[in-house]
Image: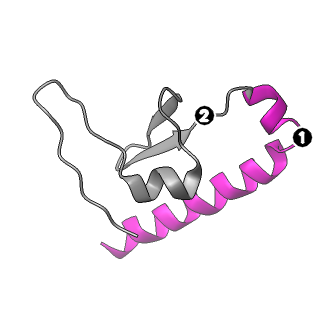
Amino acid sequence: MTIKTTVSKRGQTAVPAEICKKYGIKAGQKIAWLDLGNMITILPLPKDAIKTFRGSSRELLKTLYAERKKERERERGK
C-alpha cells in the first residue's frame, strides 16, 4: 500500500486515516521514525513497550535480518 502525504513548512505531516485504522493509532499516541539509511520507517509505539515486546526479540531480529537481506538484494540490483 502506498499513500502520499505532504510535509508542511514546519516539518509536520498527518498519518492517513486508513493507516490509523489498520494499526490502531490513536490521537496522542507516540510513533518512532527509523532512519535506515536509504529509507524511513514509521512505527507506532505501544503505551507499555516493555510489556508488549517482552519475549519477542528473537522474532524481531529475524524480521530485521530478513529486511536487511532484501535491502542488500535491491542495492545489488541497481
Please give left or right for residue 56 compared with residue 4 in the image. right
How crowded pointer 1 is (Cα within 10 Å; few <14, some 14-19, many 20+) is rated as few
Residue 36 rendering spot, x and y as whole percentages: 44, 43
Residues rendered magenta in the picture: 49-78
Please say whether residue 38 is one of the residues in the magenta stretch: no
Query: Is label 2 in a helix, a strand or a loop?
Result: loop
Q: Main secondary structure of the magenta part?
A: helix
Residue 71 rendering spot, x and y as whole percentages: 47, 62
- Name the residue nearer the viewer: 31 or 68: 31
**Residue at point 45%, 55% (across, down):** 19
Alpha carbon of mark 1 to alpha carbon of mark 2: how far? Answer: 17 Å
Seen as rendered, the residue at the extreme right is 55
Q: Amino acid at mark 1?
A: Gly
Which mark is drawn over residue 45? 2
The quadrant of the image that shows the C terminus is: bottom left
Please give left or right for residue 59 compared with residue 15 in the image. right
- Ranked by sequence position, the earlier of labels 1 and 2 is 2
Query: Is label 1 in a helix, a strand or a loop?
Result: loop
Please give left or right for residue 42 compared with residue 11 in the image. right
